Amino acid sequence: MSAGAQKDPLHGRTLAAILQELVDYYGWEALGRRVEIRCFTHEPSIESSLKFLRRTPWARAKVEALYLEMRHDKPAPLVFKKR
């Protein structure tokens, strides 16, 4: 794996997966308050939001930044070792 890929926290994550995780974590209403774009506030759906985000670089950048913030704030899952 290249050094650039290791440092990119979005490497290997699709926009669809990022959006779904944000919707699961915040819900559409809170997501629409955090990122003020119409596709999150008026009849929101994954499909319509993906179309908009793929065509609109500034909106995609805001969503990706919110995702990184969410991942940073989210507690790490507990991992138990087998004995």
Image (cartoon, rainbow, N blue to C red):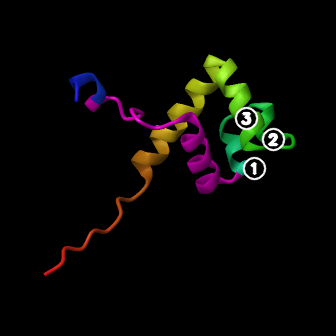
Question: Which is in the foreground here, disc 3 or disc 2?
Answer: 3
Q: Spatial distance from mark 3 to mark 2, Cα to Cα?
A: 10 Å
Which residue lies at the image location 34% right of the left edge and 29% below the top edge? 8
Residue type at tag 2: Thr
Foreground of the two, 69 or 42: 42
Name the quadrant of the C terminus. bottom left
Residue at the limit of the structure toward the front, as seen here = 1
Q: Position of residue 31 (x, y in %)?
A: 68, 45
Residue behind mark 3: 49
Q: Which residue is mark 2?
A: 41
Nearer the N terminus, badge 1 or badge 2?
1
Work out whether residue 74 or residue 57 is closer to the camera in this orientation and state it.
57
Residue type at mark 3?
Answer: Ser
3 or 2: tag closer to the N-terminus = 2
Q: Amino acid at mark 1?
A: Glu
Q: Residue furthest left?
A: 83
Q: Position of residue 34 (x, y in %)?
A: 65, 40
Residue most toward the bottom? 83
- Secondary element type, mark 2: helix
Q: Residue at x 51, y 40 (%)?
A: 67
Q: Which residues are magenta?
A: 6-27
Q: Is residue 44 left or right of residue 1?
A: right
Q: Quadrant of residue 35?
A: top right
Q: Do labels 1 and 2 touch, CB within 8 Å?
A: yes
**Which residue has dot 1 on it?**
29
